[in-house]
Amino acid sequence: MSGGVFLSRYGTVLALLALIAFNLAVTPNFATLQTLNVNLTQVCTIVIVGVGMTLVIATGGIDLSVGSLMAISGALAPMIFMGKLFELGSIYASVALAIIVAITAATLLGAFNGWLIARFRIQPIVATLVLFIAGRGIAQVMTNGNLQVFKVPEFQVIGLGRVFGLPVQVIVMTLIVVVAAWVLRRTIFGRQVLAVGGNERAARLSGIPTSRIKIAVYAISGALAGVAGLIVIAINSASDANLVGMGMELDAIAAVAVGGTLLTGGRATIIGTLIGALTIQLVRYTLLANGVPDAAALVVKAAIIIVAVWLQQRGQAI
Amino acid sequence: MNARFQTGNVLATYGVVFTLIAVILFGYLRYDNFLGSFNILSVLRYNSMFAMVSLGMCFVIMTGGIDLSVGSVAALCSVVAAYASPYGLVPGLTAGLAAGLIAGTLNGLIVTRLRIMPFIATLGTMLAASGTALLLAQNQSVSVSYESGFVDLGQGNLLGLPVPALIAAAAYFLGSVFLNLTSTGRTVLAIGGNEDAARLMGLPVARVTFLVYLVSGGCAGLAGVILAAQFGAGQPIEGVGWELFAIAAVVVGGTLLTGGAGSVATTLAGVLLLGVLFTILNFENGKGWITLSAYWQSVIRGVFLLAVVLLQAKLTGRVETQDLEPVSNVDVGPK
Amino acid sequence: MSISLLSMQNITKTFGGIAALSNASLNVEQGEVHALIGQNGAGKSTLIKVLTGYHRKTSGMVSFEGHPFEVASPRAAQEAGISTIYQEINLVPQRSLTENICLGREKRRFGLLDWPAMRAEARRLLAGFNLDLNVDRPLSQFSTATQQMVAIARAVGFSSRLVIMDEPTSSLDDREAQVLFSVIRGLKEKGVSVLFVSHRLDELYQVCDRVTIMRDGQTVRVANMADITKMELVSTMLGRDVARVAGRSTGFGLAANAPGKTVLQANALSDGRSARRVDISVASGEIVGLAGLLGAGRSETAKLIFGDVHAKGGQMQFLGQSFVPRQPIDAIKAGIGFCTEDRKIEGIVPDMSVADNMMLALRPALGRSGIVDEMRSREIAAKFIKQLGIKCTGPDQKIRELSGGNQQKVLLARWLAMSPKLLLLDEPTRGVDVGAKDEIQKLIRSLADQGLAVLMISSELEEVVEGANRVFVLREGLSVAEINRAELTEDRVLAAMANGSQT
């Protein structure tokens, strides 16, 4: 394996390890559970959305609507568990219903994206732009733009609770990553996703239902955005349709790109997306912990994205 | 079939103009003062920034690319212009424009030299511009000087018309001349239509691709200057989501996102249409019959975008129908 | 009297170690119409692209107008006096005729484009083709033939010394072709040379002075058109002597059994374009050859049978029942497999492993409740790797790292794993080295002997003649001959391909 290929394949992992080593040496109090939890908590919604984005990108598409779908899911759930729409006897029942309805709505909207793309051959970037714009508007209209403040521990456990010292959302994230990685590697669906992205013509000629696969990945991306939206509002004890998921689409795409998933489709790694998101997060944390302003971290993040994609392209060319 | 195709094309190209006229007519008939000079001028003044970024975006999209950085570049340029504003109108304008051109150069180089796909390249520039803006402004807005005359760029009137609208009008005029009357302008469209063919036709593909990102950066720079002058401050956190609204305006304006076809004039119509819809909403609420919150505007814009995109897919889709999979999954194997 | 305009000597071009051209040469004289012919993959297009600066040659000498000639881009070639009309229409469909004709040498006034003058120029050039068109309309609104004319008008408009036409007539009807020929003759009178690539042999005799024949990246013969017969042209192109040596040179053995009952019967099949009236039948246990020159509608026929293209006319019967496939999955479910002509674009998924590529079609049948049965798929993959002699490091190697022949075997395995009743093979041995070719041919025969019905499309005559039980010959989208084993000779097939003789 030549140096170029090695760097393009493992560059991100190396960067992550180097960052950890640097922090162990320089940043005070780095090796603590608290630091770990802070970083994992901040990165977890990006990872969850990034997992869906990875599947979408694996088919050669892109999903710009994830942030707006987070807002819809985040707006819908409190309306139900706070009993604004109707009363359910038990708080557990209404929380469960809220979660189910919110995620279902996000899933259906995701499927709508996929339907536009598969049925009308609309470019993914435009098709999902529709819900990027309209979706946040729908969330704002539902709540009339008002902040929904709540204190419902039964619901907020997904953002504030801990099990064995680990935040619940980190456990949720881990589960999603593990399941998605397994689906991508071990199921027929996973292979078909990669086949559609790797060579759609060949996939179609091999009898793979390419339209159905596409609709499915966008639906999954929508569902995961729905989950992420719920976690965000649980952490904040409030849902603000104007802010939930703002800019998430680009954070998720950046994590996927840095993680080594081919943006043209056909090659994808869920673990890579996790590592990509962690790397971007840790860069930010490192800079902040060492007194560099957040703004400068943005510039560094930009450089990382460009360099990572450039290295991967070079690795591809070799 | 040709006649039908022709009708379809006209509809795709000028549909937005007809719609704009229809919407304005609707407003005129339904509301008092809808076409009053105050309303017209404030719509023009407010939308000139969006018009500028959409102009740059429309050139980039015509080549089949995309520029996600326009919003944060505009924010950066508003900060730069604000810092230069005490030295006068011209230095403020020049500084903002120059910052935009630098960002555009960066995009152009990453796309043409590193051959990174435009989506990622401009995503990077977007983050970098946003970070730089925050650094320069130290995380707060930067007040502009009110003595130097700089604010006229956003708030002034000339011949009874808002200055920013005049700037945008001039830019659209020049853009239209560039696209229609120069060979470089035609090359922009040829690249978007079929990049390989353009290369085989002997056209300077890399140079023109670079140029459109440069132009888009410059347009974002002017938008930033107007932003700073209009609101009296350089705003490092403005511009979020501008890029996607600009894309929507361009698409509503009938420019194909796959590149190769489009027009500067209908892009302007797209910007105005999206802007006027917002005004209509305000007037409608003013009538008191219904109360639709301002948030409906995004929903309505989204629905408009959807309608346009579906229409485009229907009109251009016929070329590809052969490859289209049937909608139903009826098993028609041997019975 | 003959002055050399273009001389290309010992041109070699390799792509990643594989030679597309090896020591090819081409000479074109001033004011000459020169034909360049050869099979698909013979290197014609590569030679042209080397000349026009799209590809860099690996070695060799080019001189143009007596001077050494090396250009870095099509733009530079155009400026030097060589303009090209490519096989695929390389124009911009969304733009107007005027732009497509004039872009790159615009007329200006006061520094801005002079549209009236450009429109006049476009109209003038099109008038040379007897075309009176609205030059403001986008190219995509015109028929393919007209688009081709526009491409030619563009090239002619550059007042070049040499005009290269890569299959310019493939989309023209006879009348349009005649107009083109008169334009070519007009160019010739003005001293302009034309390099003419075509598979329609009759045309070459109408318009060309000399011919260069290429095969396997080399120049195999240069002749005056007047001195060479159509049969000689075809046989030189395919690399077969007319007076053929006896004996078998392919890996196909003799058929073990007589063909069984008919599996597929197609009547008057048409896709409305390339395949116009195709009649064909395949029985179990036989290999049916489908022969014809490029563009005769062979691949299109296979795509029609596989449901990849919808039939515009005709009927099919599969296993005695009416068969109307709407999409490939219908054909697959019915028991048909299809190895496409272009492995890279339509066959392999490059980033996937050998096993994954092999299991692509079988996977849904193999899995248990949606989970990949890794054990069984590895077993099956290993079985086929062994059975077909696929050279790879194992089922997990990425398919793009394999040689062409081994990729082809993987794709064959993809369908064999489905236990199909009918296998459609489009150029099964193209781009495959000699050893693997022999193995694949043996394999095809043994599959047929086991009862599989095989429809084999091949441009290699010996493959068709030695391998097939029966051969159908297509010519310009029409079935022109069905030749049975007893009468199957290369001469018969060649004659049907060249002249369409109905016997």
Image (cartoon, coloured by chain):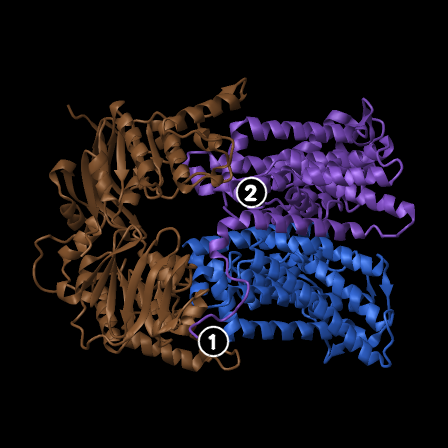
Local crowd at mark 1 within 10 Å, few (<14), some, or many (≥20)? some
Q: Which residue is mark 1?
A: C364
Q: Quadrant of residue B40?
A: top right
Tell me, by letter, which chain the rendering colours brown.
C
**Quadrant including the N terminus of chain A:** bottom left
Name which residue lies at 85% across and 52% down.
B292
Percent position of residue B70, x then y: 66, 42
Tell me, by letter, which chain the rendering colours blue.
A
Percent position of residue C205, x then y: 20, 38
Q: Is residue C43 above or below residue B324?
A: above
Q: Which residue is mark 2?
A: B4
Closer to the camera in the image, C205 or C210:
C205
**Quadrant including the C terminus of chain A:** bottom left
Residue A217 disc label: none
Q: Quadrant of residue B60?
A: top right
Q: Chain of mark 1?
A: C
